[in-house]
Image (cartoon, rainbow, N blue to C red):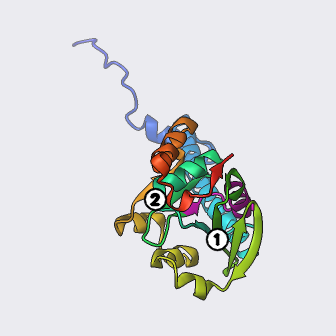
Amino acid sequence: MSDETTPNTPNDNAGDDQNANRDPDSLSDEEINAALAGFEDELNGLGNDIGDFDDELQGLLGNKAKAAVLITQLSAPDLLAAFCQLSDISAHCVGSDQGAIAVLRNMDGDGPETAARDLTTVVSGLSVVLAVNRADKLEATLWVNGKPGNQFAPPVLFMSTPSFVEDLLIGTSSIDDVRAAGYQIVDAGDYDRATALQVIAKHTKFGRGGSTRNSSVK
């Protein structure tokens, strides 16, 4: 008769026993990391929503303009972009048959008014019309030599501007829509000072000033 003994084998149900005996409030490292990752994603999404809500709230309160444009009689968008660069204005400059228009990026506080003041101060003799939408109220003001002047009723102003100006101001279109419509757009941020001066020289060479005639850059 054999004296062989059967070796001890692990209990196949040991894992189940451990799970059954585990504290229900305890989590493994993997479970904790997964939970934290999901929580971080939720916070990131919430942060974006809060930022969008804050922008919308500031717009409703009038502390931040919903849209603002500088309407000029300059003949080319690259020339306006060059002037904006020298005036430290961030804008997309759009060309049109009625004149180049700067779509401003800085909507905070009196940012649009500061842009109009700086542009008409740096480019002496240049006049612009600043059109702003604050809290769904449209205002249009003439600026000359760094100072505001006459105001215009928006419907009257829109009669002499491209249709996209009104669409941008009331929020029914974006700068991408304007680009898709085939308008030439130049970003003032693409220029440095040297390039801006070259563009200005190109437009004023041999006395070809167009709407820059009688104007000077300070």
**Image disc number at residue 76:** 2
Residue drawn at 64 percent across, 51 percent down: 216
- Figure check: 151 above or below 31: below
Question: Which span of residues is magenta-colored?
Answer: 102-119
| Residue type for callout 1 | Val
Residue 109 magenta-highlighted: yes
The quadrant in which residue 58 appears is bottom right
- Residue 10 visible, this angle: yes
Q: Which residue is mark 1?
A: 129
**Image disc number at residue 155:** none
Nearer to the camera, 10 or 73:
73
Quarter of the image where the N terminus is located: top left
Q: Picture coordinates of residue 39 (x, y %)?
A: 59, 50
Q: Earlier in the sequence, mark 1 or mark 2?
A: 2
| Residue type for callout 2 | Ala
Q: Picture coordinates of residue 139 (x, y %)?
A: 69, 78
Q: Picture coordinates of residue 11 (x, y %)?
A: 40, 32
